[in-house]
Amino acid sequence: MGILQLLKSQFLCHLIICYVFLVSGLIINLLQVCTLPLWLVSKQLARRINIRLGYCVSSQMVAALEWWSGTECTLYTDPKSYPLYGNENAIVVLNHSFEIDFLCGWTFCERFGVLGSSKVLAKKELSYVPVIGWMWYFLEIVFCKRKWEEDRRTVAQSLQNLQDYPENFWFLLYCEGTRLTPKKHQISMQVAESKGLPKLKYHLLPRTKGFWVTVQNLRGNAAAVYDSTLNFRNNETPTLLGILNGKKYHADLYVRRIPLDLIPEDEAECAAWLHKLYQEKDSFQEHYTQTGRFPGPIVSPPRRPWALINWLFWACLLLYPLGLLFAQLISSGSVLTILASVALCTAGWFHAFTPKAKSPCTGCNSPSFSLTIVFVLNVP
Ligand SMILES: CC/C=C\C/C=C\C/C=C\C/C=C\C/C=C\C/C=C\CCC(=O)SCCNC(=O)CCNC(=O)[C@H](O)C(C)(C)COP(=O)(O)OP(=O)(O)OC[C@H]1O[C@@H](n2cnc3c(N)ncnc32)[C@H](O)[C@@H]1OP(=O)(O)O
Ligand SMILES: CCCCCCCCCCCCCCCC(=O)OC[C@@H](O)COP(=O)(O)O
């Protein structure tokens, strides 16, 4: 293991990265609250400011992926579609198979200049997660309770609100509705069988209602659906902790641009169209398993320096007071206080990054919440 790799695996480095993320995130959340009165005066200006503030948060995670772990992201797509990416509104349909799939999505958003304005249909529980969830509230992220009777109205309304959105956005939809596990796959394929639908090998059966309501409400606003299929080389299962440890992964993303006009308006036809799409996605994953690549040419956008510059800015701003805090802690001479601080940080780290039983916020296991508590408790 080289010196740099050893450094990246150090707990202290992780602590610094998480500290910068959390404290800057909370400051940005506060700044977002301050934009509230502006919404009454100029909604579009408030939105543009929030896009930039949101970028300051999400680009830190992108920086961790691109610059800290050095993960490479390769895009397989039609070169004719490539110039349109980032220059139009789009609905992105992505497989939900990896812990960091959303982060790879964000990386592509960053490279095409739509990171701050990127949107997702997210479960309501995520809106309570400090930093990310609170930031999403101001970015007009669409939340669902996964109760169709309620969602059909609220999701449609939130999507209608995006009609006059001032910047290009990508709206991400995980039609599978939950992250793939063997158990969920088994249940999902039983549902497929009971509905007379072909079984899928690499995906869960897509939930069609969210897709239909999204397409219907973004018609005339979004130009296309980007059918995106993600996989990682060497059968790797990447994790956030791996990224934090500086582990380099190689993501491959296959994107097909499908004009929105080609998608049926009728609900049942639209559902059938989505099921067919997932059967195609399954065949792309099979092709990847067999050959180690997706079909089509590679047109990879290069990484940009802005995510790194943003992180360095916040690190410079926030590490100075942290240094003062440590100096104060050491000079206090109290062994008990020092030991209590170390114990709290360690406990927080383990709580944040070790897998747990199902919680109201599974998937992320609410790491930022745990870390917030650790840092708040550490303030003397
Ligand atoms: C060039 C580069 C291109 C691309 C780059 C890639 C991406 C970048 C883009 C943007 C990035 C932006 C942000 C990313 C950041 C972070 C994202 C993080 C997290 C978000 C993750 C989530 O929160 S996922 C969970 C929430 N989302 C969803 O659930 C969406 C899918 N769900 C739906 O659509 C649902 O239909 C619903 C939520 C609208 C309503 O749910 P409800 O449960 O009430 O209804 P359903 O229709 O789903 O259920 C009833 C029917 O389902 C059948 N059923 C029952 N069991 C199952 C089963 N196990 N599987 C499938 N189906 C099942 C049941 O039989 C019912 O069927 P009917 O036929 O009777 O309707
Ligand atoms: C650079 C700093 C790094 C600090 C780490 C902070 C980590 C914050 C992570 C926020 C991640 C938000 C996205 C989580 C994705 C997610 O949670 O998806 C949920 C879905 O699966 C559905 O869940 P389920 O209830 O299982 O069906």
Image (cartoon, helix red, strand yellow):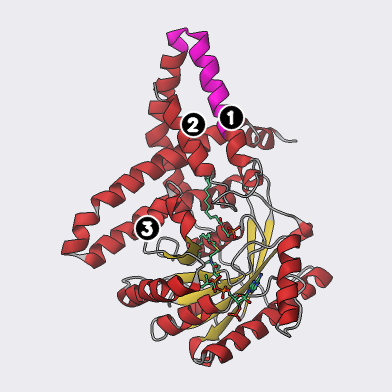
Query: Circle 3 is placed at which residue position?
Result: 137
Q: Main secondary structure of the magenta part?
A: helix
When the figure is inspected, residue 327 is found, relative to residue 311, above or below; the finding is: above
Residue at image location 50% in from the left, 76% down from the top: 91
Instruction: Report which quarter residue 316 is drawn in.
Output: top left
Q: Residue furthest right?
A: 290
Q: Position of residue 9 (x, y in %)?
A: 66, 35
The residue at which mark 1 appears reads as: 347
User: Does the residue at mark 2 contact the one at mark 1 (Cβ under 8 Å)?
Assistant: yes
Magenta range? 330-348
Q: Which residue is mark 2?
A: 374
Q: Secondary structure at mark 1?
A: helix
Pinpoint residue 209: horizontal percent, then vertical percent. Answer: 53, 78
**Residue 71 appears in the figure:** yes
Identify the mark nearer the N-term, 1 or 3.
3
Residue at the image point whose x is 51% and y is 69% from the top: 172
